[in-house]
Image (spheres, helix red, strand yellow):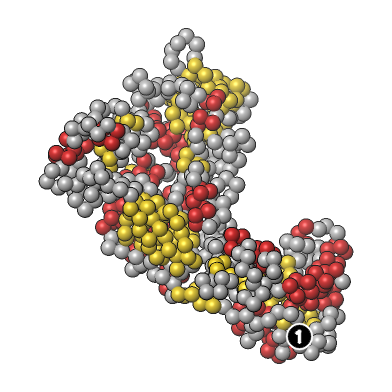
């Protein structure tokens, strides 16, 4: 349907294009009536409706009208500008029109999707189109500015996500700074024994990648380090890194580990964090045999030399030739420049003590899944033997699914990996102990490649599956040391009380406790659960709302190892695309200060959430760094003198749009 109208405004020649969006819009809004109405508006040269305006024929329709009818303003009434504003701006630009002379109207999310009354929805669509037509006539051409891209990349976090992203970019010839807060890279994956569903040895597939990171000439590896400050903007970040003292001179240490053997500190006094407290370590230690870098660390909180100054320093004596031990070492700082940043800060496991009726921390033979991972691991505290606290092997084991997941009292979300690693642990426990294993689950979720087959394999091995949420765990009468696992079997509608020697709690994945602190440092957004928020869940799953910063792994949400590696590769690809482009174009909808009217009150400076406003040294007037400004408008609204305006959101444009809605 097409309606033509004469241009009554000598300046503006507006084309209006209404999208059906299949039935998303046309099912509620009379699109033809809206187009017919738009054709009568002042300044409108042509008004059309089309089934899918974002399609190639729809875009070609706009470009053809711009060329043939001399249109100098475009209004597109369709879905969210967040989704397709760039599409229509690009179409206009390809036809020779400045892309910022295009205005979008959201008649899907703002109209058809939120109304059921067809007549009222159609009337609202007309109001919105009328407002856009009046507004777009005041638009002025704007130009994007280009910012050069620094070729280096910072990766924060040395788990499998950070490792894979760093190696991908390093292999492409880019220099990468890999920053890890722990003494070694590897993350949680280094703690696992096997990986589902193939039961590959976790160390066998992770260690070569860890070694490759250390050996790669394009990777600068900083462990025991944290990012303390991030300045700058996409293409030109300045990242300040604090290096915590290891009390070992890294260039001098050869990883012989003789200092650990020589330490006079009594065994059995310091819980081993890597083994989840199930084993003990000395103040001089290495987290695990395959640690990268292969450097020992001295713990100042437990070392006698730091606590009393009266240690015999036998560690220093055995290292007399290398002189690698330095008790006077202090923290140091480095500032590096980078064009992009990848966040791969990982996750933490749910604290099972928050579910008191499962008895974790009260009953000695209630374990978390990660603790059992260390028990079954050959490098773990028991050398791979699954043993109870009294040193005996369990004869019956209960595995409780969804601890800290899918629960309104803790976390509503599914942690995605718990069902599968519960099946894996059931297999490993049975393999190590030949125990009777009971898996109590709410729903068995096995959606990945070969996952369902793995579930069937475990079932065929004789593992017992009970569909029901465990309600309580308590000691068996008679002082046997066993536990009763009470669960309602919903398949037979019967409450079962199962005596077990050992309980394994399949704890969920949570955002790290300092996620909000980190996201403020990097200017990111978080979900309610604390996971870093992506720009778009489908179309930009690794990008963030801060240009140049990308997400990889479980800092963005719970996921298994294959998905983590895939996302790390995607984040690396985004960085490579940014770097190889050599520049980034900045959107021009930024704030601008009229220095003649600026009163130098500095109200705007602390108000800016992007730290984009500064004060000139000579004039003492405010100025906006356009590379940092995101066009949020906070400073424009806060300025007492009205000296700050914003491109594309001028007062006249906004007021004209409001009058158009109300007309």
Q: Is residue 323 above or below residue 652?
A: above
Measuring from the top left, give residue 407's x and y in whole percent. 60, 36
Number of labelled discs? 1
Q: Which residue is mark 1?
A: 12
Measuring from the top left, give residue 297's x and y in whole percent. 28, 42
Measuring from the top left, give residue 72's x and y in whole percent. 71, 85
Q: Residue at x 53, y 34 (%)?
A: 403
**Depth order, front residue of 443/566:** 566
**Depth order, front residue of 238/485:** 238
Looking at the image, which residue sits at the far top? 478
Answer left or right for 281 relative to 408: left
Q: Quadrant of residue 36?
A: bottom right
Q: Is residue 647 visible?
A: no
Answer left or right for 556 relative to 392: right
Q: Quadrant of residue 82?
A: bottom right
Q: Is residue 339 visible?
A: yes
Q: Residue at x 11, y 46 (%)?
A: 321
Q: Residue at x 85, y 73 (%)?
A: 33
Q: Residue at x 52, y 19 (%)?
A: 474
Q: Residues within 10 Å of mark 1 (few under 14, many from 20)?
A: many
Looking at the image, which residue sits at the far left? 321
Measuring from the top left, give residue 593's x and y in whole percent. 62, 73
Q: Is residue 200 above or below residue 127?
A: above
**Depth order, front residue of 332/58:** 332
Task: Give the structural element (helix, strand or loop) at label 1.
Answer: loop
Answer left or right for 118 relative to 60: right
Q: Is residue 471 above or below residue 569?
A: above
Where's the C terminus, which quadrant? bottom right
Where's the N terminus, which quadrant? bottom right
């Amino acid at each position: 349907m097409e309606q033509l109208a004469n241009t009554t405004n000598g300046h503006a020649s507006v084309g209006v294009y209404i999208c059906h969006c299949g039935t998303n819009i046309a099912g509620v809004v009379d699109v033809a009536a809206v187009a017919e109405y738009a054709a009568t508006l002042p300044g409108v040269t042509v008004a059309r409706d089309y089934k899918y305006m974002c399609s190639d024929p729809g875009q070609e329709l706009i470009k053809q009208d711009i060329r043939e009818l001399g249109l100098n303003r475009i209004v597109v009434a369709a879905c969210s500008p967040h989704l397709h504003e760039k599409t229509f701006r690009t179409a206009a630009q390809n036809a020779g029109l400045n892309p910022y002379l295009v205005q979008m109207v959201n008649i899907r999310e703002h109209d058809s999707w939120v109304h059921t009354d067809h007549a009222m929805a159609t009337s609202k669509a007309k109001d919105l189109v009328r407002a856009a037509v009046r507004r777009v006539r005041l638009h002025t051409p704007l130009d994007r500015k280009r910012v050069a891209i620094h070729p280096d990349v910072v990766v924060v976090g040395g788990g499998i996500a950070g490792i894979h992203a760093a190696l991908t970019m390093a292999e492409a010839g880019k220099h990468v700074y890999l920053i890890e807060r722990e003494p070694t890279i590897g993350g949680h994956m280094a703690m696992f024994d096997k990986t589902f569903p193939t039961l590959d040895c976790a160390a066998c597939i992770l260690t070569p990648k860890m070694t490759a990171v250390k050996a790669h000439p394009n990777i600068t590896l900083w462990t025991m380090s944290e990012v303390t400050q991030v300045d700058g903007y996409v293409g030109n970040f300045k990242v300040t890194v604090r290096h915590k003292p290891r009390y070992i001179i890294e260039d001098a240490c050869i990883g012989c580990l003789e200092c650990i053997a020589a330490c006079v500190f009594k065994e059995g006094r310091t819980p081993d964090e890597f083994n989840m407290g199930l084993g003990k370590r000395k103040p001089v230690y290495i987290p695990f045999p395959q640690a990268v870098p292969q450097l020992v660390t001295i713990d100042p909180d437990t070392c006698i030399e730091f606590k009393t100054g009266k240690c015999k320093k036998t560690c220093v004596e055995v290292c007399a030739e290398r002189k690698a031990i330095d008790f006077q070492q202090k923290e140091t700082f480095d500032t590096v420049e980078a064009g992009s940043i990848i966040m791969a800060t990982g996750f933490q496991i749910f604290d099972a003590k928050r579910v008191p009726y499962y008895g974790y921390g009260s009953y000695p033979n209630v374990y978390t899944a990660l603790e059992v991972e260390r028990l079954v691991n050959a490098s773990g505290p028991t050398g791979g033997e699954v043993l109870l606290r009294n040193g005996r092997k369990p004869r019956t084991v209960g595995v409780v699914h969804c601890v800290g997941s899918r629960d309104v009292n803790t976390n509503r979300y599914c942690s995605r990996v718990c069902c599968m690693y519960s099946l894996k642990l059931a297999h490993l426990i049975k393999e190590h102990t030949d125990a009777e294993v009971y898996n109590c689950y709410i729903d068995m979720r096995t959606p990945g490649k070969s996952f369902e087959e793995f579930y069937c394999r475990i079932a065929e091995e004789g593992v017992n599956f009970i569909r029901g949420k465990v309600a309580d765990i308590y000691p068996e009468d008679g002082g046997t040391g066993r536990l009763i696992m009470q669960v309602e079997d919903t398949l037979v509608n019967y409450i079962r009380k199962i005596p077990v020697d050992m309980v394994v709690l399949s704890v969920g994945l949570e955002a790290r406790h300092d996620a909000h602190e980190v996201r403020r440092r990097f200017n990111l957004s978080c979900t309610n659960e604390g996971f870093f928020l992506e720009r778009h869940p489908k179309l930009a799953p690794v990008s963030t709302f801060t240009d140049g910063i990308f997400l990889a792994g479980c800092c963005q949400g719970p996921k298994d190892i294959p998905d983590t590696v895939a996302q790390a590769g995607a984040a690396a690809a985004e960085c490579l695309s940014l770097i190889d482009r050599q520049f980034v174009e900045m959107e021009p909808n930024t704030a601008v200060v009229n220095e003649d009217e600026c009163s130098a009150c500095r109200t705007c400076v602390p108000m800016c959430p992007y730290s984009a406003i500064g004060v000139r040294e000579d004039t003492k007037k405010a100025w906006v760094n356009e590379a940092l400004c995101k066009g949020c408008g906070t400073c424009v609204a806060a300025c007492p003198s009205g000296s700050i305006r914003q491109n594309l959101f001028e007062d006249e444009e906004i007021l004209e749009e409001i009058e158009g809605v109300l007309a």
